[in-house]
Amino acid sequence: MAAQNTWSQRFESALHPAIARFNASINFDIQLLEYDLTGSQAHAEMLAHTGILSQEEGEQLVKALDKIREEYQQGNFNPGIEAEDVHFAVERRLVEMVGDLGKKLHTARSRNDQVGTDTRLYLRDQIEQIRNQLREFQNVLLDIAEQHIETLIPGYTHLQRAQPLSLAHHLLAYFQMAQRDRERLRDVSRRVNISPLGCGALAGTTFPIDRHYTAKLLKFDDIYANSLDGVSDRDFAIEFLSAASIIMVHLSRLSEEVILWASEEFSFVTLKDSCATGSSIMPQKKNPDVPELVRGKTGRVFGHLQAMLVMMKGLPLAYNKDLQEDKEALFDSVNTVKACLEAITILLREGLEFRTQRLAEAVTEDFSNATDVADYLAARGVPFREAYNLVGKVVKTSIAAGKLLKDLRLEEWKELHPAFDADIYEAISPRQVVAARNSYGGTGFEQVRQALLLARSQTSETGY
């Protein structure tokens, strides 16, 4: 049986059922229903405000749309494939409720500017939710960091031991990434919050509408200055997907570190049962599924960004059906980012514990204090490059002898260079190595305390 048409009598026959299913978006754009109702109410109020409809007609439409919202929220409005999309679904139900008046709602409006409005209302709301999740993630990082200012952890470059760090300093690096994420989303939101309503199909409308009125009702900051651009612009969606991809990069990097830290080889953290799983055949195993899934889900958000860019690159102005593909990309990316932020926040807050004794041992097992030996000599007048080369030889001979720098006798130090004295042992102790790096932004304990105070103030600023 052919599907019923939802458009004009220009067509003599209905769509083939398979084509109707292929064409329809109701199975995913139903997520826009409440945003569609909100946009439609603003449009109805504007039509009454400008005299295109009477005040009574406008009020009746707004009330009927409220009733549809109530039906949807109670689970009594569930449009199917015959509605094609969420916009026709609402209009059809409206006509059932108020008759021919319902057909007037689409006056001076196209599905093109309608869907653009709905999508922006949805994304504006979701961006604020994600920014709030990022703030919660940051606060958990700060809670842990405040407990571990003087806990030391090996720092790495090229995944090789480099220099010891304050664990709090390490965690604050992720705080700063999340801070940029919040700021980036705030900036994206500025371009999301521009109203295309009133652009019509592509050329505007002959009716005396007031686009600024609907923008104010819907709390948009501005309106599109060009109707062609208004209905075909998806820059805001690309920007969001880019920002979402960067968020996922940050979560994936943290996830990778947690995975490494939880391994037997590192043993820096213990995973708690609430956030780990076991093996079906190896009873001893405890698997870091949460960070592994976050790491894995990162690729799908990247994929949506790439798909959106490829979709947009060849589209002529103005609206093309290809643009229907933006919604699943947005919806899935929003859901993925929100789920990953929730999971990683729970993992940090209650799913893992740092093994401080193991960390304390780890920073004494290597040559990550070698730079401090060179700094020690440089502070006593030895040119740094000369000191650097000297210490390289010391490390080489120490490795051959099976010793660490802390194991060298004072006589051995003095044989290497007369500038060495008994205070060399304190200078290369892991705690002093960290404390001494007191330059702004460094891992020195005093710098970390100041950084924590600043970070707390940043999460308490609602404008950030």
Image (tube, rainbow, N blue to C red):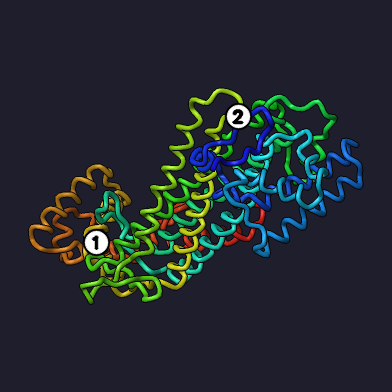
Position in image of residue 16 (x %, y %):
52, 37
Q: Is residue 18 above or below residue 230?
A: below
Position in image of residue 298 (x %, y %):
40, 50
Q: Is residue 367 above or below residue 119?
A: below
Residue denoted by label 1:
421
Secondary element at image label 2: loop
User: 79 or 376, which is in the foreground?
Assistant: 79
Q: Is residue 108 above or below residue 406?
A: above
Query: What's under tag 2, amino acid-wise?
Result: Tyr
- Residue 325 visible to the viewer: no
The quarter of the rendered structure image containing the N terminus is: top right
- Specify the farthest residue to the front: 1
Gap in angstroms between the C-alphas marked 2 and 1: 77 Å
Q: Residues within 10 Å of mark 2 (few under 14, many from 20)?
A: some
Residue, x 53% and y 52% (percent of image)?
A: 179
439 relative to 116 in the view: left or right:
left
Residue denoted by label 2:
319
